[in-house]
Image: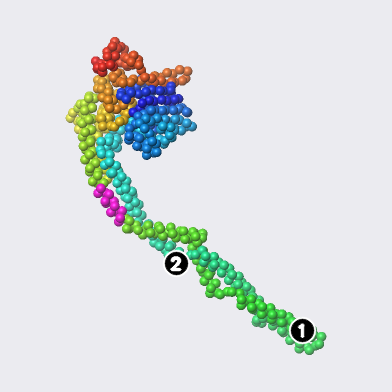
Amino acid sequence: MLLKLQTKNYAFFEDIDITFSDGLNVITGESGSGKSLFVKALMTLIGDPQDTIKINENSMIQGYLIVDRSAREILKERGINAGEELIITASFQNKRLIYRINGIMVPRDLLKRLSKELFVFHTQGSQSKLFSNSFYMNLVDQFVDEKLLQDYRKIFRAYSALSEKKQKYGNNISDILRKRDFLRFQINEIESFVPDTKEEEELNKRYSMMLNSKRIRDSLIEALENIRMGDGSVYEILNNVKYAISDLNEASLKDLVDKLDVLIDLIEDWRYEAEKIYENAEYNPEEFKKIEERLNGYQLLKRKYGPDVETITKNLKSMKKELLELENIEAELNKIDDEIETLKISLNNLALKIREERKKAALKLEKRIKKHLDDLNMKNTKIRFYFNELNELSVNGLDELNLIASINPGTPEDLISKIASGGELSRIMLAIELAISEGLGDLSLIFDEVDAGIGQRIVEVLAKKLKNISQKHQVLVVSHLPQIPLIADKHFVVQKTSMKNETKIFIKELSENERVDEIVNMFGSDFKDMKIKIEEVMKSGWEVD
């Protein structure tokens, strides 16, 4: 229940500070004075800000409320421990709307959820809901066992998730099988190679050493061939020169022959040392080839599966995991089919129970709505909920609901959205909201322009209905007809003034004398002589003739 509403710098309003009754509260005022703007302030307070409102920087809306256990439980889920009294604040700072509950900043979605435990709004254009199947479903489900609905929706979420998973696999089974085969090839390629970081390091060292030894041996063998082996070698040339000079047998050439012997001995020593180095240079062509092939294998794996062995090993692990998932697809699909079938049986059973409860609830609602329609001068209207029984399970079970009616005698039934006029739609919507108010919990009902589309002949009936509802619920009504404020517990008036290019809106609670004057003005000049009668009605609840 809304105890008090305060605003500062909000829209065109002067600061508001008003206290409400727990019964029937009526807000009146000239057309365009800002009555609906006041309702929009309430909607903004509970998390439904209206884009059409002029928002002032540093403005604030604050409501003082009494809440029941269900609302406190919602807050407790978010870590907010609250008693029966709440202070909700909506403030506009730096072009942002900030919400607080008892001084604690909260997200807007919490206010929207909480509002369902606090208020029911009937706003201008509410009859547009009559064009929505979901509206009728939600309407009837208010009177269906909540646990039954929750159980169904919980199972349906699991059912939908499995169905989506099956559809995902089923549509791509050929791609999955190709992926599985390719993963097997990749895993086999890596595992058959058995990559190892230490082995690669040792092979690279060994390869570098043997490559260097090979270069040394290749260079030495070429040098040895030029010095000692074959025609035209250095050794052969020096020996030929030595023999040619020795054959001359000249004493003067003996020194040259000795020097040639020294050169030949040096060459022999060089050859011996070179051959020793050659033989000691570690190089095995077969081993070198194997190392080279192994290292080439490492390079190939790294080009395919990662820049290093560590990454290859990591990717191998991921591939195995993915392959395991893919190899289990067939078994998983069979398992999913079994689970889906089990859930489907449960859902069908629950859906049939829900349908049975919905039909019972619909019959009760039809009677309540019909009673209110009779009172609202639509006695010839026959109205009922139409159940379209579906073949496929949906989030709402196996039902789709609509409202059909026959407005005039002898006319066939059809969707009310097709056969009712604007005024009739307004009254039907009003009858529905009056009907559901009988089964609501401790909620405040807010009606904006509740008497729109309602003629003078039945407005007194509407006033009595609102008064009756206010015995169980707090009711806030924006009205432009005098019969409703006539029996209000509290009466507020909204006034707008414009001067010097500035518009201001004021709202205040009326005293008894001010109420009489306001209601006389609402009746018009023809009723001014009824001031005494109006005062009597305000005190006793008598009807105005």
Relative placement, left or right, of 320 versus 400 is right
Residue 265 location (% of width, % of height): 71, 82
Taking depth in this image into account, of 389 and 35 the one nearest to the observer is 35
- Amino acid type of the residue tagged 1 in the rendering: Asp
Is 332 in front, or is 229?
A: 332
Name which residue type carries label 2: Ser
Q: How is the image coloured?
A: rainbow
Residue at image location 36% in from the left, 19% down from the top: 509
Asked if the magenta segment contains residue 254, the reply would be no
Displayed quadrant of residue 355:
top left
Q: Residues within 10 Å of mark 2 (few under 14, many from 20)?
A: few
Image quarter in which the C terminus is found = top left
Residue named by callout 1: 258
Label 2: element kind:
helix
For the residues carrying marks 2 and 1, which lies nearer the camera in this image?
2
Q: Is residue 219 above or below residue 42?
A: below
Residue 494, horizontal then vertical, whole percent? 38, 20
Residue at figure coordinates x 41%, y 33% from the top left: 101
Question: Of label 2 and label 1, which has the lower sequence position?
Answer: 2
The residue at the point 72 percent across, 84 percent down is 240
Magenta segment range? 334-346
Q: Is residue 81 left or right of residue 271?
A: left
Q: Secondary structure at mark 1?
A: helix
Residue denoted by label 2: 192
